[in-house]
Image (cartoon, coloured by chain):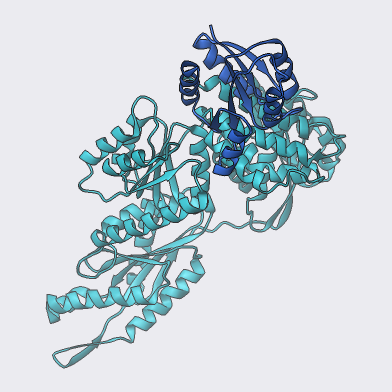
């Protein structure tokens, strides 16, 4: 079974994503801020890491830097969630090292499709 | 995918934060950073779980905030700032219980817009925005019912979300198209999917317009205005009397009820007049029908030219016409009609070198209460017309029921432990215009605070709205206290109670409550109720 880390500070959204993924038999670890996410990353390897852009302690971008700097156990695919929808913002996120981008608000079904696509690619 | 659970969570979380902020007395204000985060997190979540309305409101509020500002919000200021959000939260939470009023006749003369969207928060929001523009909005989340409603009500504009449960919006469009030949009703699609393919498909299915979500409200409004203008032009071409070129009776029957509906909402007094050309039969008999027709036409055109652009004239039938004077009190309408009668009587008609003048008479009725129906109002005006004829013609007679108020100050107090309800009630009461009575409003979160304020004993007439169930001192206790106190006869009490608390209601009435409203209540309904009670006061 595939393992996913979800870092999202907004509780309701986190709950929704976790429920959606668990229904599809993914194993999901959930982090409510950047620090929790980093703790998970240091102790587990993931098939996919989903990061929210705006989070307390470390932002999504800061976490990517830490992953790229080798602070995580493994190198996983990274999907970034963000309300910043302008093209240059998206580009910035992808340049920083995220592999995929999803604009908020998103449809939960679209997110699931995207995740399946990413996981199958790998 | 069922999103109910998440919606409830978000609503509950939102309510909890609002309550935490506004509840404690010793609160020293809320830092802007917290307000920003609160709104930002609603915005981020709401769109995904189909609470588009919440997303839209929080997005708009966010634009007014600088994330890095060091400002600390005072509670009152913040409450005002967040009012729309609080209201939407309340309405959303209780939406299923609130009756969406639909009526078989088209109420008031405002354009009627139908919105079909399964995102309830979005519906509520759009309804609010459009009704602020003075348009009537009917809403439906169920596409089957919506299609029926469409054919019953003939809206002036249809706004349709293409992502609907059970049936997609394209099918709804098709259903409507197959029956739509007779009516010209512009159709606008709203969609979170805003790609070229979807847009093309929408236009192919019969849409006249397309707008992506999140909706840019300013653009949305302008588009709607354009569609309504086109619709109006179309309607006028078939609702105009061929001979006199003024509105026909059919249009009157559609229009008149709308003014009454609008009155209930805005309390804008308006007047209706039934007018009739004097001795018209003699004109016909003496000069023939051709001239009779010319007289009718010139009369109608004369009135149309002479009234204000907001006034409307209809040909009711024969030589009888109806004039509606919006926002016009009796005295003013009477003055205008008298002037019209005088001016028209100066007009000289010539036929075969013979000159003659013509007069008309008018009956007037002014709508300034909610009890009267369109049919009754017409009857009163018509009756006055015959009174005018009887009293010698070329004059106005009026039948008016007057209401007079004693100039006074009335205390209005609200006691409710729910911050959202308290805030909304305060706002509603502030908006009530009582004419000569000045309202002195105060809100309290519990009974003891109310009694400590001393308001209960200041000897003024007092209208008290009290929640039945409260933690510190319950509503019945408050009620009992005022009704057995020294100023008992000065108090009118409206009790807010839960739906299922029948015993509670019975007890409240026994203790002397004047009225009760069960929660959850629709705000417009409660407003009407409060106004009625307040007016009964004096």
Name the outermost residue toward the top. A1
The colour chain A appears in is blue
Q: Residue at x 23, y 44 (%)?
A: B180
Say which residue appears at 31% left-offset and 53% top-offset: B253
Question: Residue B311: x and y, percent?
Answer: 41, 67
* Residue located 62% across and 40% down the image: B58
Q: Quadrant of residue B83?
A: top right
Name of the residue lying farthest toward the bottom:
B353
Name the spot of residue B164 as percent of width and height, x first.
39, 30
Q: Quadrant of residue B291?
A: bottom left
* In the rendered image, the vertical position of residue B204 relative to residue B479, given as above or below: below
Rendered position, B383 above or below B150: below
* Nearer-the-camera pick, A91 or B213: A91
Which residue lies most toward the front here?
Answer: A69
Q: Quadrant of residue B7?
A: top right
Viewer-proximal residue among B289 and B69 = B69
Q: How many marks?
A: 0
Taking depth in this image into account, of B114 and B412 the one nearest to the observer is B114
Q: Position of residue B32 (x, y in %)?
A: 77, 42
Question: From the viewer's perspective, is B516 left or right of A37?
Answer: left
Q: Nearer the viewer, residue B347 or B207?
A: B207
**Chain B: colour as depicted:** cyan
Q: Position of residue A59 (x, y in %)?
A: 71, 30
Q: Is residue B56 above or below residue B290?
A: above
Please state if B313 lies on the left or on the right of B403 as rendered: left
- Whether residue B176 can be seen here: yes
Tell me if residue A51 comes above or below residue B530 in the rendering. above
Question: Is residue B462 in sight in this rendering?
Answer: no
């Amino acid at each position: 079974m595939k393992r996913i880390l979800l870092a999202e500070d907004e509780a309701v959204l986190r709950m929704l994503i976790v429920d959606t993924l668990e229904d599809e038999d993914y194993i999901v670890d959930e982090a409510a801020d950047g620090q929790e996410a980093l703790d998970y990353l240091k102790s587990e390897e993931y098939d996919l890491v989903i990061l929210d852009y705006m989070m307390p302690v470390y932002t999504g971008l800061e976490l990517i830097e830490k992953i790229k700097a080798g602070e995580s156990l493994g190198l996983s695919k990274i999907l970034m969630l963000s309300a910043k929808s302008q093209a240059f913002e998206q580009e910035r996120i992808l340049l920083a090292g995220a592999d995929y981008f999803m604009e908020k608000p998103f449809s939960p079904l679209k997110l699931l499709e995207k995740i399946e696509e990413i996981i199958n690619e790998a | 995918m069922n999103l109910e659970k998440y919606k409830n969570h978000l609503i509950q979380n939102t309510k909890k934060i609002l309550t935490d902020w506004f509840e404690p007395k010793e609160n020293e204000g809320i830092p802007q950073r917290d307000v920003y985060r609160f709104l930002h997190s609603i915005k981020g979540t709401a769109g995904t779980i189909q609470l588009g309305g919440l997303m839209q409101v929080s997005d708009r509020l966010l634009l007014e905030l600088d994330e890095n500002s060091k400002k600390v919000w005072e509670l009152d200021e913040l409450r005002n700032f967040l009012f729309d959000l609080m209201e939407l939260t309340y309405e959303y939470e209780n939406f299923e219980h609130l009756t969406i009023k639909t009526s078989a006749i088209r109420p008031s003369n405002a354009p009627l817009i139908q919105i079909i969207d399964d995102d309830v928060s979005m519906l509520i929001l759009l309804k609010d925005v459009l009704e602020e523009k003075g348009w009537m909005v009917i809403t439906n989340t169920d596409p089957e019912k919506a299609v029926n409603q469409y054919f019953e009500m003939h809206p002036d504009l249809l706004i349709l979300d293409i992502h609907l449960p059970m049936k997609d919006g394209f099918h709804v469009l098709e259903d409507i198209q197959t029956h739509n030949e007779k009516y010209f009703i512009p159709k606008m699609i709203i969609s979170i999917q805003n790609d070229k393919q979807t847009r093309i498909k929408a236009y192919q299915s019969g849409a006249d317009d397309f707008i992506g979500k999140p909706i840019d409200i300013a653009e949305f409004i302008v588009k709607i205005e354009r569609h309504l203008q086109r619709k109006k032009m179309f309607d006028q071409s078939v609702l105009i009397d061929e001979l006199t070129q003024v509105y026909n009776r059919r249009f009157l029957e559609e229009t008149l009820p709308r003014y009454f509906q609008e009155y209930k909402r805005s309390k804008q007094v308006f007047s209706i007049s039934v007018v009739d050309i004097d001795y018209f039969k003699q004109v016909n008999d003496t000069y023939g029908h051709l001239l009779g027709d010319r007289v009718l036409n010139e009369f109608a055109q004369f009135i149309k030219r002479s009234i204000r652009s907001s006034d409307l004239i209809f040909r009711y039938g024969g030589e009888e016409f109806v004039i509606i004077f919006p926002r016009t009190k009796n005295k003013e309408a009477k003055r205008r009609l008298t002037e019209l009668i005088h001016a028209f009587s100066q007009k000289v008609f010539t036929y075969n070198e013979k000159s003659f003048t013509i007069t008309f008479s008018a009956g007037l009725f002014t709508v300034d209460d909610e009890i009267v129906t369109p049919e009754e109002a017409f009857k009163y005006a018509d009756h006055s017309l015959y009174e005018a004829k009887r009293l010698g013609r070329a004059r106005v007679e009026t039948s008016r029921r007057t209401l007079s108020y004693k100039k006074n100050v009335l205390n209005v107090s609200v006691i409710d432990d729910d911050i959202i309800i308290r805030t909304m009630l305060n706002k509603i009461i502030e908006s009530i215009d009582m004419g000569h009575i000045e309202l002195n409003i105060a809100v309290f979160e519990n009974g003891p605070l109310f009694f400590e304020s001393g308001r209960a004993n200041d000897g003024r007439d007092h209208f008290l709205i009290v929640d039945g169930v409260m933690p510190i001192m319950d509503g019945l206790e408050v009620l009992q206290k005022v009704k057995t106190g020294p100023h008992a006869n000065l108090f009118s009490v409206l009790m807010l109670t839960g739906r299922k608390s029948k015993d509670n209601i019975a007890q409240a009435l026994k203790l002397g409550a004047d009225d009760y409203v069960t929660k959850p209540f629709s705000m417009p309904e409660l407003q009407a109720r409060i106004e009625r009670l307040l007016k009964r006061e004096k």
